[in-house]
Image: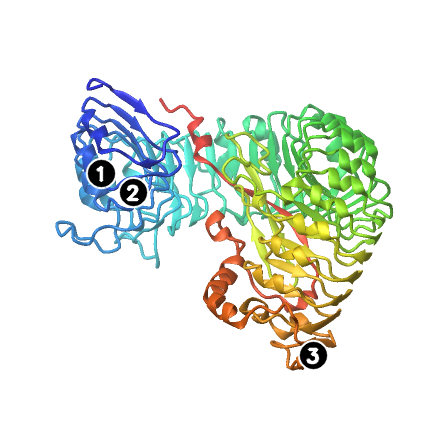
Amino acid sequence: MASLRHLALSGFCGLIPHQLGNLSSLHYLDVGYNSGLYVDSLHWTSSLSSMKHLGMSFVDLHAAPDWLQIMSRLPSLSELLMQYCQLDSLNPSLGFVNFTSLLIPNWLISNISATLLQLDLGSNSLKGEIPHGISNFLKLEILEFGENHLTGNIPDDNQLNGTFFPKSLALLSNLKFLAIRNNSLAGSLDEVLLTKFSKLKVLDVSQTSLFFNVNSNWVPPFQLENAYMSFCKIGPNFPEWLKTQRSLEILLMSMSGILGKAPSWFWNWTSNVDTIDLSGNHIEGQLPHLSANVKELNIANNSFSGSISTFLCHEVNRRNKLEFLDASNNLLSGELSDCWRYWQSLIHLNLGRNDLSGRIPYSMESLVVLKALRLNNNSISGDTPSSLQKCSNLTLIDIGENHFPMTIPLWIGKMPSLQILHLRSSGFKGHIPLQICQLSSLRILDLANNSLLGPIPKCLNLINAMAMRPNSTNDNFLEYFNDLSPYFDSLMLVPKGVVLEYEGNGNLGLVSIIDLSSNNLSGSIPVEISFLSELHLLNLSRNHLMGKIPEKIETMKELESVDLSQNRLSSEIPPSMSNLTFLGHLDSSYNNFSGRIPSSTQLQGFDALSYARNPELCGAPLRKNCTKEQKSDGDTPLGKAEDESETSWFYIGLGVGFALGFWGRHVYFQFVYDMKGQAYVSIVLKVNLICKKFKKLTFW
């Protein structure tokens, strides 16, 4: 083993053994992208003097505060990959370096600049400035500083105020890959700076405060393959320099301040581009004639107008290879023409929030690989054709906020992959079909605000996805593309009193919701519903339900929001509800509950409005005191409640977030009192970029 030169380890967890340092002949070591690997020191790497490539992405390095000093002692190092390594602090006792908030010191730059070809410190919590000494990396071809907290100082010859793009980067003339996305860099990207990067292939300046300041006739010296410029200031005009980029494959310019019509050259120029994202601008005009090579087109949240039929049935577009189309939230009109046989590559289709009309055409049965169908918030009417059941790969159906005065089709039970069914506010009537219980993968069921009647199906407990904990590691919920192009949906839910946003990356696969509110349902709440132990949000409000809350509701331990308001429920509130430690929202108002509210920090911590208009209900938080006759035999012992109060409050705070604080990001809650209890579920497309897409490129 002493002569081993190449070592890549996968499928390991735990402490990285120091014995790896005995492999003194190693040129290549990659222990990255494992789950649960960590170090207690990096001193064992000091003997690896021949090391050229060191990959430690996703390894927990927080116990090695001297990592920078150690890395600088590797004389042959040319590739250093340390993404997501929790590099958020340095040991202040390192007196030979003048550290404050600067976490990329110049001494590192000067020690290893002569050999380094690739430096990847993305997605850590690095702070401070990009040091001027980085200009000494004369051989550097790949620089990844994305998703940190880096800033930059204004050069002496510049009169602007605030932070600024570090001009020292302009001296890295060999750069082919530059990623500084999601930092606190600001200022101008001008021609003088950009002209230095003559070899650049990938530019990622997205989610910064940078703005492009170039003339309309500027011709860049580089030929980009990937351009990630979302959330930069590019507009109001389309960047004319793009038409000089003949090798471009990916163009992301969402939320970039572009106004008006796209120039005539733009859609003709896209013959080589396979991914276009122009969402969140103010672009006007008709939908384009697409190049046959475009696979992903996102023009959501603009002002495109005109007939959808012209786009769907135009002869030029019949040769398309489109897999992803999001034209939601525009001004499109007309009927969904029967031309869908030309769009058989579609995997994700979102035409929601337009002014489309007519029926769902039968030719949609041609979309056999479709996984997500979103036609919500239009004026579509008529029947839902049974031919849609041929789209058996559908994971998401969202046709809510339309006009379907019919019963829910029975064929819906023949969609084995369906995980989200959103039929809200569409005029559906009749009973909830038992066939819905056959959707074993269903996690979000939203039938709210229709004219449904009859009982709640007892067979809902057969929906396995709501009864079993999902595997957050292996579950690629709503991932519509391969690992080179992952697009995820996020879900925004607004139940009464709380706003939740769940983003993709697996988080949606961890949420289970049933919303049957604002219908004419009757009968009792079936006991079987308590078997849905993984349900997080339950809304049965504004119906005609009678009887009592199931005693076994305590088995639904993941519940974080329950709305039973405006029904005819009666009897006592079961004391077992105090065991729902994640419950952050409860509304039982406008019913006929009686007796004492169970004495526990959990249930008595809610506002009195949660129990209002139940004349026979008493006890805190209501002002009505209970008589001895009203005392519930099942009250939780006060001593036990006090013992558990501290723990309960902890879990309330944690539970309100459904534990997404550690499952994911961008989960937030705020009280919304003017919503009157209505819940709206909308699926909002978001683009998540993964570095594997970059690795597709060949630089050498």
Tell me, yes or no, if residue 196 can be seen here: no
Q: Position of residue 542 (x, y in %)?
A: 77, 62
Counting from the top left corner in percent of width and height, residue 514 is at 69, 51
In space, the residues marked 3 and 2 are separated at their CA atoms by 62 Å
Q: Which structural element holds mark 3?
A: helix
Disc 3 versus disc 2: nearer the observer: 3
Q: Is residue 209 left or right of residue 107?
A: right
Say which residue label 3 marks.
Answer: 629
- Sort mark 2 into few (<14), some (14-19) or many (20+) by Cα contacts within 10 Å: many
Disc ID at residue 105: none
Label 3 vs 1, first from the N-terminus: 1
Q: How many marks?
A: 3
- Residue indicated by mark 1: 42
Q: Look at mark 2 in the image and give the residue it sits on.
A: 61
Q: Amino acid at mark 1?
A: Leu
The amino acid type found where label 2 is placed reads Leu
Q: Judging from the image, what secondary structure is the residue with disc 1 in? A: loop
Q: Looking at the figure, which quarter contains the N terminus?
A: top left
Q: Residue at x 73, y 73 (%)?
A: 614
Which amino acid type is shown beneath numbered disc 3? Glu
